[in-house]
């Protein structure tokens, strides 16, 4: 059975990555790193993750009229992503991210948004039929917040489920939150949205209570190696993370979000969708790069540890 249609509205970048023993301190130069160049951007990463998980995916994005932009469109077409609504900006370059990864898999990232910063509501209007014929819309915050709010209101008024990964972290309006079906923040993003410092399951529950009170039906707070807390209306569930040796955490959150959407598009519960996502994200952190690290659905069986839930 064909899964329901997922529209991802978000960023498309080229990632330039250096793997080093440790992250430099300000003013320091470190020699001896290994360089990689990979396609990235949270929107594109999540679209690729959803497609590799078996989703029916359209990406709405904006690139520069340059080699990075043209390569991106070719790549996403090869990933079975519908690219009709990736716009080419004649005035601004494609987005670029500079990423440093240490030996423990931790990273620091600086992004030059380029054309991503010019994905406007007018661009969205050109894709309105595509959005209105979708079942799920997935967004992040590497495009203008006005565009995110515009899409969320447009989709929710049509009864389409809107899922937001609020990254990079920033405060959000109550008007945006009330149009969301699911929000998927990490610990730091949940803290900004709730005012609660998230360090364990109990504090995650408190943060989820505050966020859901603003009108979001389901809150999924990712806790890294601890797992993920789900608040679905008045119920709390917890999904443990798989125990793996992390090589690079880049795109783990994006893989998680894309996989959650695919699970939902297949009619799975939020619990089973998060289980699927935890399995996919665990594989991602064992590999270098952004999209290069995202697994295909067929690879998920390589993690044979039984995932389980805890009602709390």
Image (spheres, rainbow, N blue to C red):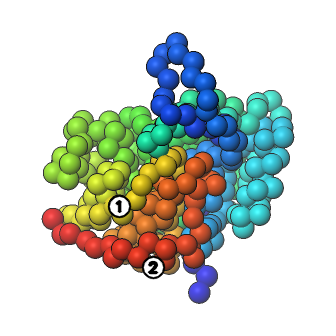
Between discs 2 and 1, the one toward the N terminus: 1
For residue 279, what is the image quadrant? Answer: bottom left
Quadrant position of the C terminus in the picture: bottom left
Q: Which residue is mark 2?
A: 267
Q: Which residue is mark 1?
A: 243
Quadrant position of the N terminus in the picture: bottom right
Along the viewing direction, whichever of 58 and 132 lies nearer the viewer:
58
Task: Find residue 19 and report its horizontal and vertical position in percent.
Answer: 58, 37
Q: Is residue 223 above or below residue 158?
A: above
Task: Find residue 7 and report its horizontal and vertical position in percent.
Answer: 60, 61
Specify whether 79 is left or right of 103: right
Specify whether 261 is left or right of 180: right
Q: Which element carries disc 2, helix, strand or loop?
A: loop
Q: Image point 44% across, 60% down: which residue?
A: 282
**Total marks in image:** 2
* Residue farthest along the top direction in this orientation: 27
Q: Image point 57% across, 76% down: which residue?
A: 298
Q: Image point 72% across, 67% down: which residue?
A: 80
Q: Image point 58% across, 59% down: which residue?
A: 294
Cα distance in 3D space between marks 2 and 1: 27 Å
């Amino acid at each position: 059975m064909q899964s329901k249609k997922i529209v991802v509205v978000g960023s498309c970048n080229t990632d330039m990555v250096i793997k080093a023993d440790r992250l430099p301190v300000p003013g320091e130069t470190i020699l001896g790193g290994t360089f990689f160049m990979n396609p990235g951007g949270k929107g594109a990463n999540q679209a690729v993750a959803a497609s590799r998980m078996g989703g029916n995916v359209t990406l709405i994005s904006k690139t520069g009229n340059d080699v990075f932009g043209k390569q991106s469109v070719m790549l996403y077409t090869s990933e079975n992503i519908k690219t009709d609504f990736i716009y080419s900006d004649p005035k601004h370059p494609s987005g670029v991210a500079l990423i440093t990864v240490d030996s423990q898999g931790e990273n620091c990232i600086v992004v030059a948004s380029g054309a991503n910063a010019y994905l406007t509501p007018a661009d969205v209007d050109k894709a309105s039929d595509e959005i209105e014929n979708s079942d799920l819309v997935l967004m992040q915050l590497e495009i203008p917040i006005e565009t995110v709010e515009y899409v969320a209101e447009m989709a929710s008024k049509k009864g389409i489920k809107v899922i937001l990964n609020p990254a990079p972290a920033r405060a959000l309006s109550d008007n945006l939150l009330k149009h969301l079906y699911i929000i998927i923040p990490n610990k730091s993003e949940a803290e900004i949205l709730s005012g609660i410092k998230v360090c364990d399951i109990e504090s995650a529950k408190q943060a989820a209570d505050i966020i859901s009170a603003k009108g979001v039906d389901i809150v999924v707070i990712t806790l890294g190696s601890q797992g993920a807390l789900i608040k679905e209306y008045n119920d709390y569930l917890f999904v443990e993370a798989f125990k793996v040796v992390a090589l690079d955490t880049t795109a783990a959150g994006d893989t998680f979000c894309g996989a959650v959407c695919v699970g939902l598009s297949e009619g799975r519960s939020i619990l089973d969708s998060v289980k699927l996502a935890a399995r996919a994200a665990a594989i991602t952190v064992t590999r270098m790069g952004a999209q290069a690290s995202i697994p295909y659905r067929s690879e998920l069986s390589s993690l044979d540890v039984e995932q389980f839930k805890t009602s709390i």
